[in-house]
Image (cartoon, rainbow, N blue to C red):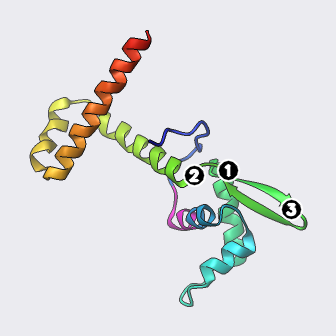
Amino acid sequence: MVHLPHHRPKQLSLGPLEREILEILWELKCAAVKEIHDRILADPNRELAYTSVTTVLSRLEKKGWLTCEKKGRSFVWYPRVTQAEARALWAYEQLNQFLAVGNPDVVAAFADSLDQSSVEQLDAIAQRLKAARKAREEES
């Protein structure tokens, strides 16, 4: 089970190019701008300036998704959270937005439109919540 990471980016929303670059970094583990730029331009139908990649990397660093280190004459970029941790963060954000509806009747109204696998998934979530609640009570 993936837990929420200790480090959380300041801003979870990402644009398409930011997400693409982050995906590349998750795959490579770390990379210099040139490696990322070359990877994107491997698609012959793509055009993207080197400076655009640099700008997006800086933006991702400001948002808290990346960190960079100077190695020799270039900078190497690293993701600050794993892909699994990012998915957990995005799911957590969506869950909080869903729960912000605040009205159980509105939330329950969706139950009629769910398919069987979704209902089973909700049942599994409910069981895990009960087990977590019970474990917390036993610790107290």
What range of the chain is rendered magenta? 14-20
Q: Indicate the amino acid at tag 2.
A: Thr
Question: Could you tell me which residue is drawn at 38 percent across and 20 percent down?
Answer: 135
Check the image and report above or below for 45 versus 89.
below
Q: Position of residue 51 (x, y in %)?
A: 72, 73
Q: Report the disc number at residue 62.
A: 1
Q: Position of residue 104 (x, y in %)?
A: 19, 30
Q: Earlier in the sequence, mark 2 or mark 3?
A: 3
Q: Check disc 3 and report the residue beneath it.
A: 71
Which numbered disc, 1 or 2, marks the residue that appears first in the sequence? 1
Q: Could you say which quadrant of the image residue 22 lies in?
A: bottom right
Q: Give the amino acid at mark 1.
A: Lys
Crowd tier of the residue under label 2, counting other residues whose Cα lies within 10 Å: few below 14, some 14–19, many 20 or above: some
Is residue 118 left or right of 41 when viewed as pictured? left
Of helix, strand and loop, which one carries label 3? strand
The residue to which callout 2 is attached is 82
Q: Residue at x 70, y 62 (%)?
A: 30
